[in-house]
Image (spheres, rainbow, N blue to C red):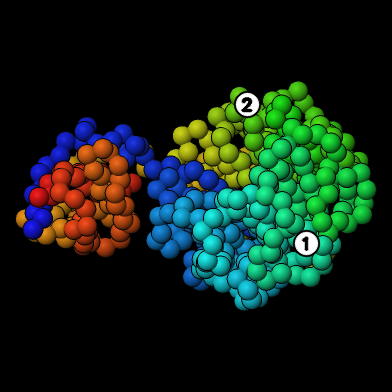
Amino acid sequence: MKKIILILSLLFIISPQIFSQITWVDVASGAEFNLAIRSDGTLWSWGFNGNGQLGTGNNTNYNEPVQVGSDTNWQVVSAGAFHSLAIKNDGTLWGWGLNANGQLGTGDQIDINHPMQIGADTNWQSIAAGYAHSLAIKTNGTLWSWGFNYAGALGIDSLANMLAPVQVGMDTNWKQATAGGLHSLAVKTNGTLYAFGFNANGQLGDNTVMNKSVPVQIDSATNWKSVDAGFEFSLALKSDSTLWGWGFNGNGQVGDGTTIEVRHPVIVAGNHRWKTYAAGSTFGLAITSDSTLYGWGFNQYGNLGTGDNIQHNSPEVVKTANNWTHVAASDGYIYQGSLFGFHATGLKGNADVICATGANYTGQLGDGTTTQRNTFGCNTGQLNTGLETITDQEKILLFPNPTDGKININTRNKIKGEYLIYVLNTNGKVILRKHALSPEVQLNLSSHPAGLYLIIIQNHDNQWSRKIIVK
């Protein structure tokens, strides 16, 4: 029979990776809501929730981040105008929110207010949620689309809406794709750029205003690295760190210093080496190689974070501009002839908070208010960076001892709220990770071989550890 003996463990012997503080690793901005993933694999959301796009199981708006379920294996998220997509680290695809045009890919047109798996495939690699359609790439390099197919935005040589993922052509060398208002863009592994869908404002970049229902190559360059689609314009990054824009430019969103419509890629103004960027409803944001953040385009709601509400036709440095690692811009949508979706979010170096600016009428900035800002406030989703070590073994009970492998943990209410339980082997590998809310939890290690293991119990404020021996 396997027996487990509990021994007090000193914290300095634990793998440094487990001790690193929980951080935000990704944030995505929809029209009036946001999704974000923490380093512990948990998923969070806030803002407008009228269509269930927050995934919280209800339709209540939240002006601060709330956790989506209890899973700890979320890997990638994408926020559309009113729907959400996500991939877990097992390669499964999930969707929730508005589904009037089949943009969730669940095979019907029923809205969902909690994550639902899309199909049964486990080889999804990347996703892009647009205004009312979706794109995704599998690990085999195939491109898939579903949802609203106005003007051929799905790229399947048809104008019919699709309620479940359908393959775009037969190519197997797609690297990255993005879904805009009514158009789509994608890059292949050979560095070529393609576009399809609505093109009335030249947003496809093929120097015409003709819609395309199948992917068409944009210019002859082979050094395109990535692309992002705004509502009626596009941005793309080349491997030489230059940023390019095209499409509708009435608000300066192309970033070339003018408000003239552009039907082919033109370089974004400024002699900068760009690292990452985001195309919003009618504005753009980008981070340079030295981690400085710039914004341009429509700015009536302060969504550029430049400290004013003035339109900028070329990149303008934002307030608190240094140390940026990630930026996201809100998607747009049209309601009664007006365009909405004007906020932005981002992460800085330590990533222990989320920064946000712009419109906030549904709590989309996540700072606990509905107050509009024109500079980035970095106080959303504050994570406590301090970890207090409790060495009193009686603070938390692990029993029975000895045991056959089933270990009961009782925190005796010393940990408030959510917490994580890790079990590591002697190589420092995590063999079990469990998310918990109850003060009493049971672990089952009976399937693991005899040996020395380490249990770590961690929340935002405290961290405990116990060494266990399985005999």
Tell me what residue is drawn at x 56 percent, y 66 percent. 118
Disc 1 is placed on an element classified as loop
Tell me what residue is drawn at x 85 percent, y 44 percent. 205
Tell me what residue is drawn at x 22 percent, y 39 percent. 426
Tell me what residue is drawn at x 31 percent, y 34 percent. 16
Name the quarter where the N terminus is drawn. bottom left
Tag 2: Cα neighbours inside 10 Å, few (<14), some, or many (≥20)?
some
x and y, in percent, of residue 23 in the image: 43, 42
Residue 147 is marked as none
Q: Which residue is mark 2?
A: 289
Q: Which residue is mark 1?
A: 156
The reply to whether residue 435 is visible in this rendering is yes
The count of marks equals 2
Image quadrant in which you'd find residue 31: bottom right
Q: As rendered, which of 284 and 400 lies closer to the eye? A: 400
Measure the C-alpha gap from mark 2 to mark 1: 37 Å
Left or right: 35 as drawn, with respect to 18:
right
x and y, in percent, of residue 465 in the image: 20, 44
Disc 2 is placed on an element classified as loop
Inspect the image, locate mark 2, and give the three-letter code of the amino acid beneath it.
Ser
Tag 1: Cα neighbours inside 10 Å, few (<14), some, or many (≥20)?
many
Q: As rendered, which of 193 and 197 lies closer to the eye? A: 193
Left or right: 451 as drawn, with respect to 325:
left
Q: Earlier in the sequence, mark 2 or mark 1?
A: 1
Residue lying furthest left: 402
x and y, in percent, of residue 206 in the image: 88, 45
Q: Is residue 147 above or below residue 196?
A: below
Q: Is residue 312 above or below residue 82?
A: above
